[in-house]
Image: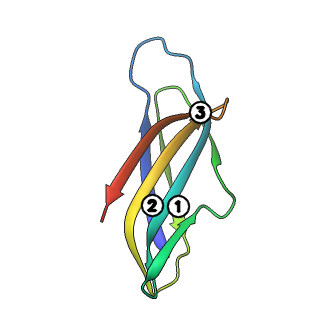
């Protein structure tokens, strides 16, 4: 089980609220082979004006070795607006 926490911030003045979705992607190896997983229900809805904290847990096999975590923000039109990748 992996616990995650994201802080999503929209910088600027007088910006319209962001209405879209967010996605989490984990990649690494499982039994020596390439492996990846994402949120079980797919991208999750997200609406914010200035900032929002998102947190939860994601089940992963105990023998999985996570090498990267990628968080993505997708706007209402389906365009990726932001991506953050963390290499472990």
Residue 18 sits above or below residue 59 on the image: above
Q: Report the Cα–Cα distance between label 2 and label 3.
A: 23 Å
- What residue do we see at 47% from left, 11% from top? 14
Marks 2 and 1, the one that precedes in the sequence: 2
- Its colouring scheme is rainbow
Q: Tell me if label 3 and label 1 are in contact, CB under 8 Å.
A: no
Label 1: how many Cα within 10 Å (few below 14, some 14–19, many 20+)? few
Nearer to us: label 2 or label 3: 3
In terms of secondary structure, where does tag 3 sit?
loop
Q: In the image, which disc is placed on residue 4?
A: 2
Among all residues in the image, which is located at the extreme top? 14
**How many circles with numbers are drawn on the protein?**
3
Residue holding disc 3: 79
Q: Report the Cα–Cα distance between label 3 and label 1.
A: 24 Å
Q: In the image, which disc is placed on residue 21?
A: none
Instruction: Name the one closer to the observer, 68 or 43.
Output: 68
In terms of secondary structure, where does tag 1 sit?
strand
Residue 25 sits above or below residue 73 on the image: below
Q: In the image, which disc is placed on residue 56?
A: 1
Image location (x, y in percent) of residue 58: 54, 68
Marks 2 and 3, the one that precedes in the sequence: 2
Marks 3 and 1, the one that precedes in the sequence: 1
Image location (x, y in percent) of residue 55: 50, 55
Residue 5 sits above or below residue 52 on the image: below
- What residue do we see at 58% from left, 38% from top? 74
Instruction: Name the one closer to the observer, 55 or 26.
Output: 26
In terms of secondary structure, where does tag 2 sit?
strand
- What residue do we see at 39% from left, 17% from top? 12
Q: Tell me if label 2 and label 1 are in contact, CB under 8 Å.
A: yes
């Amino acid at each position: 089980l992996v616990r995650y926490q994201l802080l999503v911030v929209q910088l600027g003045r007088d910006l319209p609220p962001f209405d879209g979705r967010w996605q989490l992607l984990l990649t690494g190896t499982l039994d020596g082979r390439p492996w990846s997983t994402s949120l079980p229900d797919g991208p999750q809805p997200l609406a914010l004006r200035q900032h929002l904290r998102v947190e939860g847990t994601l089940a992963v096999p105990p023998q999985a070795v996570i090498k990267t975590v990628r968080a993505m923000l997708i706007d209402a039109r389906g365009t990726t607006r932001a991506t953050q990748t963390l290499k472990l």
